[in-house]
Amino acid sequence: MYSIYGLCNALAMIPGVNLRVLTTDSAGPELSDSVPVKGFPMRYPPGYEVYFCRRRWGASFSPELILRLWVMIRWADVIQLTAVYSSPTIPTLLFARLLGKQVVWSPLGALQRWEGATRPAAKAVWERVCNALIAPGACVLHVTSLEEAEESSARITKATVERIPHGVEFPESLLERAWLPGGALRLLFIGRLHPKKGIENLFKALKELNDAAISLAVCGTGDEAYARGLRQLARDLGLERQVSFLGHVDGEAKMKVFMSADACVVPSFTENFGMVVVEALAHGVPVVASHGTPWAELVERQCGLWVENDPESLKKAILALRGRDLADMGARGRNWMKREFSWDAISQKMLCVYRRMARADGAAGTL
């Protein structure tokens, strides 16, 4: 969500780009969780319009959105489609095919699999339908890593692949911070509460460390039954005093949790990108990421560790942090993000893809 928003803001600032966004008003898992829409369409400060359509069922089903798709796709030179197993996906691909439009499709990691992935047979049928709707040379899959490129192209075979990472917003100024205050090591997990995130293995690593001076802040929301299970696991392992559940954090609260952490841990079984990695580094926080993430470069850049996500490997990585200069690691990570992951740089790369697609279609107008 944050990467899409950041990309839209950056694109809208580029001369010659005319951007419209069609989406639902969803702001959470419940139908009552909706964006407070002020006008239709809403005009965002960077200069683009967002058409929020009322979600009526599930995560993304909106009859109004489907009805507006045809007109919006006919208006555009290039369509940027996000997500895969979502209600608007197949109608968007169908209308783009009928209208002869070019599509840049960001699956956001949905085409990757892990051993706990659900409904593989239904997903395979969905993918076959999507493949059937893609015209030759009319679709580019936008992926963020080599791993995502390999798995996604194996499922959506009619699209070409373009690898461009997500960008990140940088806080204008960082708050004053103390590293390892009183010898305490403060770890942070921030993200969706979901089995693929490997949070259980992180808890088990903390149990094996058996060190009251190591704490973990867990930030994020997810399925309530699963979240209750995580809280119960923390109690069963005797980690009540070490693990705190802070729920969803955003804005200033999100910045504060980053600035109160000595390291961010990302123990996922699989990630196409891992937005939290770039966010943590942008805030000067070293990262411990699992081999399920595409972040081997953390080691080369000397701003983090890249390890297996089993409890023993995570335990060793956490122990290793105490012998590192965390301030220097964080500074190196922040400088790396500034050089290569600013939204200005990423939006220009995406724009090159859009313009190439528009030229291939013979479109003459702006994007």
Image (cartoon, grey):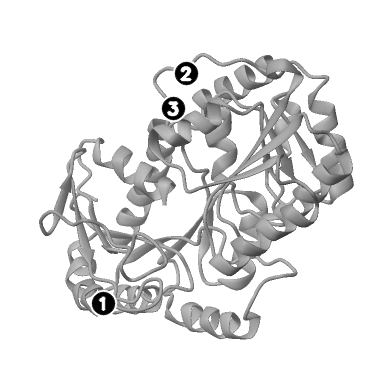
Q: Is residue 156 above or below residue 230?
A: below
Mark 2 falls on what kind of element?
Answer: loop
Which one is in front, 72 or 255?
255
Asked whether, in this view, residue 324 is left or right of residue 162, the answer is: right
Mark 3 falls on what kind of element?
Answer: loop
Quadrant of the rendered image containing residue 334: top right
Asked whether, in this view, residue 91 is left or right of residue 18, the answer is: right
Disc 1 or disc 2, which is closer to the eye? 2
Write the residue at 64% across / 80% down.
120
Q: Which residue is mark 1?
A: 66
Q: Position of residue 209 (x, y in %)?
A: 87, 38
Quadrant of the rendered image containing residue 328: top right
Query: CA separation, marks 3 and 2?
Result: 9 Å
Asked whether, in this view, residue 250 is left or right of residue 206, the answer is: left
Q: Is residue 8 above or below residue 94?
A: above
Asked if the residue at tag 2 contacts the one at tag 1, i.e. Cβ–Cβ closer than 8 Å, the answer is: no
Q: Amino acid at mark 2?
A: Leu
Which one is in front, 270 or 56?
56
Disc 3 or disc 2, which is closer to the eye? 2
Which one is in front, 96 or 334?
334
Say which label, 3 or 1, has the lower sequence index.
Answer: 1
Q: Which residue is mark 2?
A: 174
At label 1, counting other C-alpha atoms closer than 10 Å, the crowd grade (few under 14, some 14-19, many 20 or more) is some
Write the residue at 58% across / 85% down.
122
Query: CA separation, marks 3 and 1?
Result: 35 Å
Q: Position of residue 199 (x, y in %)?
A: 70, 53
Asked whether, in this view, residue 196 is left or right of residue 365, the answer is: right
Q: Position of residue 106 (x, y in %)?
A: 46, 58
Query: CA separation, marks 1 and 2?
Result: 43 Å
Q: Amino acid at mark 1?
A: Ile
Q: Which residue is mark 3?
A: 170
Q: Amino acid at mark 3?
A: Phe
